[in-house]
């Protein structure tokens, strides 16, 4: 079963508008972390934002915010005032513990965002 | 600021050949990971390591081997390369002291098996 689900393979947004990229997760670990990464066409993975499972407030980093709804197990990324440079693939990821006491990062299949001028 | 360094960046292999993807990090991170990313897809965990001498399988370990003799290095070995192993490979590292510690990626290695 998918642990991280991103249901939007592709999204379009007009420049300067806001866009929400969806992410739902599944874990039985009470302590976990949720991350969003950006992958531009050049291929590198860029860390955007982090939300801890015990954090009371939604994380924000500049134009990025994470809409964390724990009961719904969702961690949607909101990008405000979209820019052409935001066109990229976006991955949601979860850090969870393993039965052996170690940690893994599990990634979703990604959402390709295209910002239109 | 080297971070996570992967070599080679591009490689074409023939079916049945073997090769090693090198990965080194200079951040003294205890955790290291290997992922593969198939075209248009997400990242799948191949192997990971929590420290020198300790490795564990991820989601898709078949056809690969790893070793971790030092904190800095985490090479990925492909033994009998198959076309299904054509992918982009990412090495990554993290320090697991704090829950919010993110994972740092290398720039990726593009591998084609023909």
Image (spheres, coloured by chain):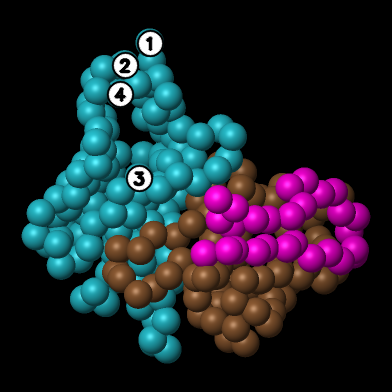
Chain colours: A cyan, B brown
Q: Nearer the viewer, residue B38 or B21?
A: B21
Q: Residue at x 15, y 67 (%)?
A: A54
Task: State the residue position of label 3.
Answer: A48
Task: State the residue position of label 1.
Answer: A117
Whether pointer 2 and pointer 3 mark residues with C-beta atoms closer than 8 Å, the reply is no
Q: Nearer the viewer, residue B72 or B48?
A: B72
Give the magenta-colored segment's residue range.
B1-27
Whether pointer 4 and pointer 2 mark residues with C-beta atoms closer than 8 Å, the reply is yes
User: Based on the displayed image, in which of its 4 quarters is residue B81 positioned?
Assistant: bottom right
Residue A92 shown left or right of residue B32 in the figure: left
In the displayed structure, B23 sits above or below A114; it is below
Q: Residue at x 58, y 40 (%)?
A: A43
Q: Are marks 2 and 3 on the same chain?
A: yes
Comes first in the chain, label 1 or label 4: 4
Residue B4 position within the rendered picture, expressed as x and y whole percent measured from the top left: 59, 57
Q: Which mark is residue A15?
A: 2
In the displayed structure, A24 sits above or below B30; it is above
Q: Which mark is residue A82?
A: 4
Residue A67 position within the rendered picture, expressed as x and y whole percent measured from the top left: 17, 46
Comes first in the chain, label 4 or label 2: 2
Q: Are marks 4 and 2 on the same chain?
A: yes
Tell me the SS state at disc 3. strand
Residue B41 position within the rendered picture, expressed as x and y whole percent measured from the top left: 54, 47
Comes first in the chain, label 2 or label 1: 2
State which chain disc 4 sits on. A
Q: CA distance from mark 2 to mark 3?
A: 19 Å
Tell me the SS state at disc 4. loop
Q: Categorize mark 2 by other alpha carbons within 10 Å: few (<14), some (14-19), many (20+).
A: some
Q: Categorize mark 1 by other alpha carbons within 10 Å: few (<14), some (14-19), many (20+).
A: few
């Amino acid at each position: 079963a998918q642990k991280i689900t991103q249901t939007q393979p592709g999204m379009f947004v007009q420049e300067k508008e806001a866009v929400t990229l969806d992410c739902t997760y599944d874990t039985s670990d009470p302590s976990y972390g949720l991350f969003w990464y950006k992958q531009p066409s050049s291929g590198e993975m860029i860390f955007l934002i982090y939300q801890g499972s015990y954090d009371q407030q939604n994380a924000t980093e500049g134009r990025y915010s994470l809409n964390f709804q724990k009961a719904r197990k969702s961690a949607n990324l909101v990008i405000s005032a979209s820019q052409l440079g935001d066109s990229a693939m976006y991955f949601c990821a979860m850090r969870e513990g393993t039965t052996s006491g170690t940690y893994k990062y599990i990634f979703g299949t990604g959402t390709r965002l295209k910002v239109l001028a | 600021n080297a971070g996570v360094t992967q070599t080679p960046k591009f490689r074409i292999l023939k079916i049945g050949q073997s090769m090693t993807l090198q990965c080194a990090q200079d951040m003294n991170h205890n955790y290291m990971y290997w992922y593969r990313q198939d075209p248009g897809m997400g990242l799948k965990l191949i192997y990971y390591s929590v420290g020198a001498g300790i490795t564990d399988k991820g989601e898709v370990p078949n056809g690969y081997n790893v070793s971790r003799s030092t904190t800095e290095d985490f090479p990925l070995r492909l033994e009998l390369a198959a076309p299904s192993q054509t992918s982009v490979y990412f090495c990554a590292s993290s320090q697991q002291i704090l829950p919010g510690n993110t994972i740092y990626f290398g720039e990726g290695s593009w591998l084609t098996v023909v």
